[in-house]
Image (cartoon, rainbow, N blue to C red):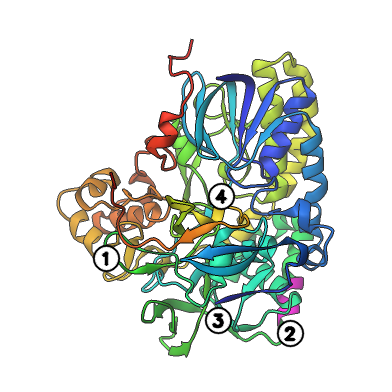
Amino acid sequence: MFRKLHEPGADAVTIYIDGEAVAAEAGESLAAALLRQPEAWTRTTPVSGSPRAPYCLMGVCFECLAEVDGIASVQTCLTPVKAGMRVARQQGRRVLTA
Amino acid sequence: MSAVDLLVVGAGPAGMAAAVAARRHGLTVLVVDDQPAPGGQIWRAVETVAATPRGARLGTAYRSGAERAAAFRACGATYEPGSQLWQIEPGFRAFLTREGKARTVTAKAVILATGAQERPVPFPGWTLPGVLTVGAAQILLKTADTVPAQPVWIAGSGPLPLLYMTQLLAAGGKIAGFLDTTPRGRMAAALPHLPRALAGLGDLVKGLAWSWALKRAGVRVFRHVAELAAEGEGKLQTLRYRTEEGRETSVPAEVLLVHEGVVPSIHAPLALGCAVEWHALQQCYVPKLDAWGLTSQPGVFVAGDGAGIGGAEAAELRGSLAGLKAAVTVGGLGEAAAEHEARPLRRRLARALALRPFLDTLFAPRPQVFAPTDATIVCRCEEITAGEIRARAALGRPGPNQLKAFTRAGMGPCQGRQCGYPVMHIIAAVQERPVGDVGFYRIRPPLKPVTLGELASLDGTGPVS
């Protein structure tokens, strides 16, 4: 859906989206990295299960929520990419686990 | 718990200028911002990007943010990026979360410089992956050097789509077409404001230069587009649009960017009980402010686009004015000295705002923005349609808060930042009331979702002394 205009070079890092290694640039928002994937959606809604993707990129719409390093419902547009970050697209409503 | 004279919320043009002004007069200042670097939306990532080829492509107005950010960094304010403010109690005690930990800060005065957001524009399919705002795409360009992979469709009205398109072309991006949603006859309506607008001649010329650049580049423009629909299985695949004349067209599309102007972020002032009034020309609520940006609540200021849309230059000036008055209120600055320093700022502010009535009239949102079809989702979080809101609005005379209780519209994580205005407009239309009389959702803490873990990490919990 989106593409990056330059090679990250020294700032290149690897993150994992649903277990798959993906190239990103340190410091850019996680939402930007997600939007460059072939499947650009980040979550399915708790109400109808329809897919959603980053929409506003500035922290007001809460569409870009994903699970980041084990924490659910993280706003990926406000989260800078770090090497080794583990991201899971969020499926439907949250559940409490004991 | 830490204590400061002044808490500034937001590190865009207004917040940075407010901090600089308050520091110059000796206040202790804490600036919190939810972004990772100073500059606000207009100067996103400017510290790292300004000196690069990307900075050159983004233009001089963007690059000029670098010196503002440098002055802000040097002013002696404590700056905490990546902070979410989720509650302010009178007194003031602010609750913040940073890197998963919550804490409280006390301050004698607060300047809310939380800026603006793009006006929510519900239309069929606007929740599909592939539909984003123009502002979102510009943030991707500024911060991640990231552009739509395929020729992109852009729909909307206002200066931002024109600016983004010129920046996108300079970056080597491709535009499938621009659906200009400005209704017919707007220029004629705006022209009476032109003489006053000439004080802002520089910006007018800039706008014309963008239009010419797009024409030279051969960007296809389709005018008087009145309705949009995004369609596809799980993502945008087809874009349908209809002009005022009723001509309907359907095109394949992967990314559609929309923009119908910006509105002030009013959640924080509303939460603090600051009085607001309806701004008919900008079709939004603005806080009631005096000439310094002081709200109806003592010690609470609003500066920048949060005070009413005025652009970056006006935002900086409003920030400086609020910072000065804060130095009078909680510091040692005399009234007369502040007034003396404020005079040239006020003159420049009047000039910076001179263009607004012209722009606000020319780019006033088309009526369809406020009257989505019944099947259109209005509340993105809870997936409530315009039809559901309409049906409920006709039973009795409920306001936004009752409709929220009945339907859950506005109850999701965005807390009405997307559906607030559309719901107001639907209520006004159904109940035949002036939209400004309908009121907004009651804004309650937390202003942003907080985890139980963050709450548990809170420090001292005693009352404010």
Vertical placement of residue B18 versus B105, above or below: below
Q: CA distance from mark 2 to mark 1?
A: 43 Å
Q: Residues within 10 Å of mark 2 (few under 14, many from 20)?
A: few
Figure check: B328 above or below B419? above
| Magenta highlight range | B209-214
| A9 left or right, relative to B92 | right
Apparent side of residue B184 relative to residue B379 in the rendered image (left or right):
right
Kindly identify which chain the residue marked by label 3 belongs to: B
Q: Residue at x 29, y 53 (%)?
A: B409
What chain is tagged by disc 2? Answer: B
Residue drawn at (39%, 70%) of the image = B123
Residue where numbered disc 4 is placed: B116
Q: Secondary structure at mark 1?
A: loop
Mark linked to residue A48: 1
Q: Secondary structure at mark 2?
A: loop
**Element class at badge 4:** strand
Q: CA distance from mark 3 to mark 2?
A: 17 Å
Residue found 27% across the figure and 71% down from its top: B375
Looking at the image, tell me whether mark 4 or mark 3 is earlier in sequence order: 4
Closer mark to the observer between disc 3 and disc 2: 2
Instruction: Check residue B456 for magenta coloring.
Output: no
Circle 1/circle 3 CB separation < 8 Å: no
Residue picked out by circle 2: B217
Q: Are marks 4 and 3 on the same chain?
A: yes
Residue B442 lies left or right of residue A87; in this view the side is: left
Q: Are marks 1 and 4 on the same chain?
A: no
Real-space Cα separation, disc 4 to disc 3, in angstroms: 27 Å
For label 3, the residue is B223
Labelled disc at residue B96: none
